[in-house]
Amino acid sequence: MVEILVNAMNRGVKVLDWTPQPEKYKNDNVHPCVRNIPNFAGHDWWMVTTPYPSGDSSVENPILYYGDSGDNGVPPSSWQGGVVVEDTPAAGYNSDGNLYFDGTKLWVFWRENGTPDCVEHNVSRGVFGRYTTDGIVFSEKYYFCGNDFSIVGLTGDTEMCPCVINVGNSLKMLATYYEFTPNRRSYGLSIWAGNLEQHEFTHEINVGILRNENFDFWHFDIFVHDNKYYCVATAENPNAVYLGVSDDGINYTFWGTPLISTTLYGDYYYYKPTALVKDGILYLWHPVKANGISTIWMDSRNFNEVLEILNNGTSKITGANNI
C-alpha cells in the first residue's frame, strides 16, 4: 500500500458524542447522513446516524438528530433530538440510514437485513422508510424495495447504503452494488427509480465507478453543487474518505487523493461520510473511533481549495474498475 502523504482537508471538530438510551446505544454513532433544510420543523439541520458499538448490529437503529445554524449560517457545533426512528427487530438488524426531504416531509430510509419484515416481503434485505413533518412523530413504516442481486452462483446486494436523491427531474435511489461471496468486492452502484406516493423503488441498471484499484467502494453519500453531483465514499476498511464527481448523477469518477485519511491524522473508522457545500465551504461529517466508541466529527474547507488540491494531486482515475 502506498503511503498517503497528502489530504485535501484538515482534521475538524467533534460535533456529536451522545445517543439516547446510552445504556443501550453506548453513545456510539456511525453512518451519518446530514441535510440542510432551512426552517423545517423549526430547525435548519438534520442528521440520521446508526449506533454500532463494538460491532453490535442489534442496536444499529436509525436515530434522528436536529441542529441549529451558528453564526453566518454555519452547520451546528452540537446536535439535539435523538429520536429512534426504528427500534431493534425481533430478528436480523437495521442499518444504513439516509435522509430525503420532499418539500414538505422528511423521509428517513434504512436497510433491513433478515428481519421479520424482510421475511414478510420475501426478501433477504430490503429498504424501508418513514416520514415526519415535525422531527418527532413518524408515519407508519413502508417497504420500498428488496435485494435484486441475481448473479448465478454468487451472493451480494444491490441496495446497500441507499441514497435517495433527485437526478435532474427524477427521483432516484443509488445504492452499493456488492458481491459478498465467493469474493467480497464492489461492482459500483445500482440505480433505482423512486416513487414516494406508491412507496416503491424499482431497479433500473447497475453502473461501475472509476476509482483507485485499492479503493473498495463500500458506503457513500451524494451532494449537488454547481450543477455537478459529488460522491463522498469509504471502503469497507474505512481508513480514507474519497471524493468523486459526475455530470449526470449516475456515473462517477474519483480522485486518487483522499479528502482525509488515517495516515496523516491517526484516526480510525471513518465509517460512511456525508457532505455538502454551503456558501462555498465543503463540510464533511464522518465518525472517528477512540476507546471503542465512535463519535461524529465535522471537517471544513473552501471547496475551490479542495478541488485545487485534488486536481494538483493524483489525478482522477480514468482506467478500469468499471463493470
Image: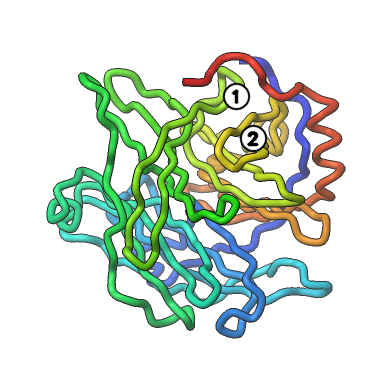
The vertical placement of 50 against 232, above or below, is below
- Amino acid type, callout 2: Tyr
The vertical placement of 76 against 230, above or below, is below
The vertical placement of 166 against 239, above or below, is below
Q: Nearer the viewer, residue 132 or 71?
A: 132
Q: Residue at 80% of width from left, 55% of height from top?
A: 281
Check disc 1 and report its element: helix, strand or loop: loop
- Amino acid type, callout 1: Arg
Check disc 2 and report its element: helix, strand or loop: strand
Q: Residue at 39% of width from left, 40% of height from top?
A: 204
Q: Quadrant of the N terminus?
A: top right
Residue that lies at the very extreme toward the front in this rendered image: 169
> Pointer 1 and pointer 2: residues touching (CB < 8 Å)?
yes
Quarter of the image holding residue 63?
bottom left
Q: Nearer the viewer, residue 187 or 281?
A: 187
Residue 244 appears left or right of 312: left
CA gap, disc 1 and disc 2: 9 Å
As drawn, the label of residue 48 is: none
Q: Position of residue 152 (x, y in %)?
A: 22, 21
Quarter of the image holding residue 265?
top right
Q: Nearer the viewer, residue 314 or 170?
A: 170
Residue at the spot of label 2: 242
Residue at the spot of label 1: 211
The vertical placement of 282 against 323, above or below, is below
Q: Position of residue 62 (x, y in %)?
A: 40, 62
